[in-house]
Amino acid sequence: MRKKIRIKIPKLAYEVINKDVEYFNLKKETLYNIIIKELGFEKFTEIGYDIFSLDEKREVYFNLNEINTELVPKMIAFHLLESDIDMIIKIFITYANLHPAVRERVVYKNLFLRVEQAIKDKKNIKIYFNKEIIDILPLALERDGKTGYNFLKSKHGKDFYLYEMKHIEFVS
């Protein structure tokens, strides 16, 4: 049975997460569950925690997906906490403290791992981008100076291209 979550998080964390919901074009519940799954066993950041604690709060309601419903008690034990609410708030604050490029890596972890390995190995990969399969040589990951999110710099034939990572659906 999926667990229902109702928490109050700092307004700043709420705004950062909602910005990512829009940017990545994900449902809120989907992003919340990705954040919990990917950061639940990581060390929480204490940087700015006192500032966040003074910020006004926003309510968030969502259901944990099945895997997180099973993992959350293990995460609580791992962090030696007593409450799933406190832990999820700390996870969301940790996520909000990350740079946009790092947050994108959290959301699309497997995609980034595959792309980074291909860059390291200097191997061509096929990406599914804007409903096309494209054979490219990935060269580097670059940050957008305005948004802070990631682009994949690559070579296709003799030309060089930048692909927004959020639009790459899979890599093979």
Image: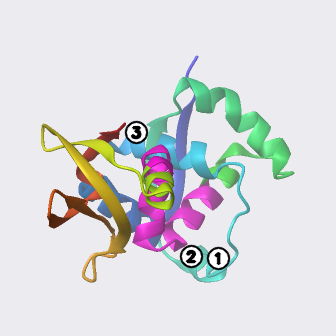
**Quarter of the image where one finds residue 50:** bottom right
Determine whether 67 is above or below 129 in the image: above
Question: Which numbered dot is residue 30?
Answer: 3
Whole-percent x and y of residue 57?
Answer: 48, 66
- Residue at the top extreme? 1
Residue at mark 1 to residue at mark 2: CA–CA distance: 5 Å
Q: Main secondary structure of the magenta part?
A: helix
Residue 158 appears in the picture as rendered: yes
**Residue highlighted by disc 1:** 49
Q: Amino acid at mark 3?
A: Thr
Whole-percent x and y of residue 116?
Answer: 47, 57
Secondary element under disc 3, as helix, strand or loop, is helix
Residue stretch rendered in magenta on the structure: 89-114
Whole-percent x and y of residue 63?
Answer: 48, 32
**Quarter of the image where one finds residue 138:** bottom left
Contact between labelled residues 2 and 1, with CB atoms less than 8 Å apart: yes
